[in-house]
Amino acid sequence: MDWKDYEKITKDIYETLGKESGVKIECYGNSCKVIGNSGVEHQIDVLASHSDGIHTYKTAIECKYWKNTISKDTVMKIHSIINETNIDKGIVISKKGFTPDAIAYAKSKNIGLALLREVEKEDYGRDLPIFEIISSKVRSPKIIQFQMISKEGANRGDENVEISKIELIDSKGRRSPLKEWIDHFYAQLHKENAIEPLTIEYKFEDISLNNIETSESTPIQSIVITGVIEEKDLRWTQTDKTWLIMKSVFEDKIITVSEKGVIKESKFRFLN
């Protein structure tokens, strides 16, 4: 890892953990610059923003992939930048920690400090949360062909069907989303371990396929779906691993991944 990787990982983690709160990354890296009240241009490692629906707040994050602890001078620098640019919050990220003066100064100026580092030799043997990947591969269902057979027996072929907008309506006006039938088909693919193409025909009586948006309705007698189970390598980027580890640490969770690619969480436990 170098300082550029460190900036990107910081950006990705902040973006991912803040997604549910509406955090957005405005920019990061060498091209991320802000003009201050003096007209002077300032480079920001990561600039993020979030809104409460009325106001938008900006956060400047300084990433220090240094061998030494961070002194108060670095904290003072980001404090001066946020004042000069009217940014609302400043955070300093370090891989080696901070001096007592830096911690005291940051606390007095409401500057956030965070430690983000790689695992080191002395960490082994300590009581650390478990992070485990159960499977290195995922098995996912894939639809190869989707056909709708009309009352006249005509095959409407592979149509660009947007599943969320299609429903089935019977003669009594009862409705069921097309997604329910797709989910059932996916479950059958897994049940049959369909590494070779599997075709299932769902036959109906007095059923119409209805487009929720356009209200266009088409009487059908069956839906024919062909699909297969695909096995793919589970690829983890450094950011994925870091995010999952941080999630396991801060939320006291064990993160596992099933062979279907489902991320599961269970309660934290310690190594013996």
Image (spheres, rainbow, N blue to C red):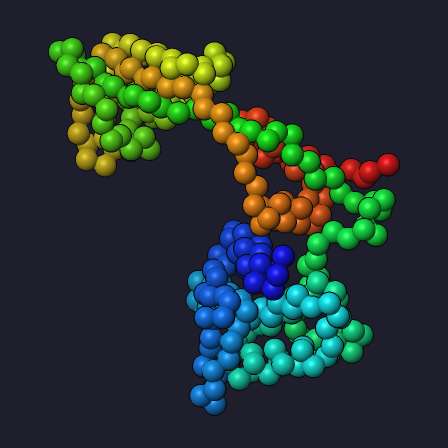
Please report the residue visible at 81 percent of the width from the left and 39 percent of the height from the top.
270
One can see residue 176 in this view: no
> x%, y% of residue 216?
17, 29
> x%, y% of residue 229?
45, 21
One can see residue 177 in this view: yes
Please report the residue visible at 63 percent of the width from the left and 49 percent of the height from the top.
242
Q: Observer-nearest residue: 235 or 141?
A: 235
Q: Is residue 215 above or below residue 182?
A: below
Q: Is residue 17 above or below residue 227?
A: below
Residue closest to the far left? 152
Residue closest to the far front? 2
Quarter of the image with the N terminus in it: bottom right
Asked where in the image residue 255 lies, by quadrant, the reply is top right
Q: Give left or right: position of 227 versus 105.
A: left
Q: Is residue 44 above or below residue 39?
A: above
Q: Observer-nearest residue: 172 or 139?
A: 139
Q: Give left or right: position of 5 versus 41.
A: right
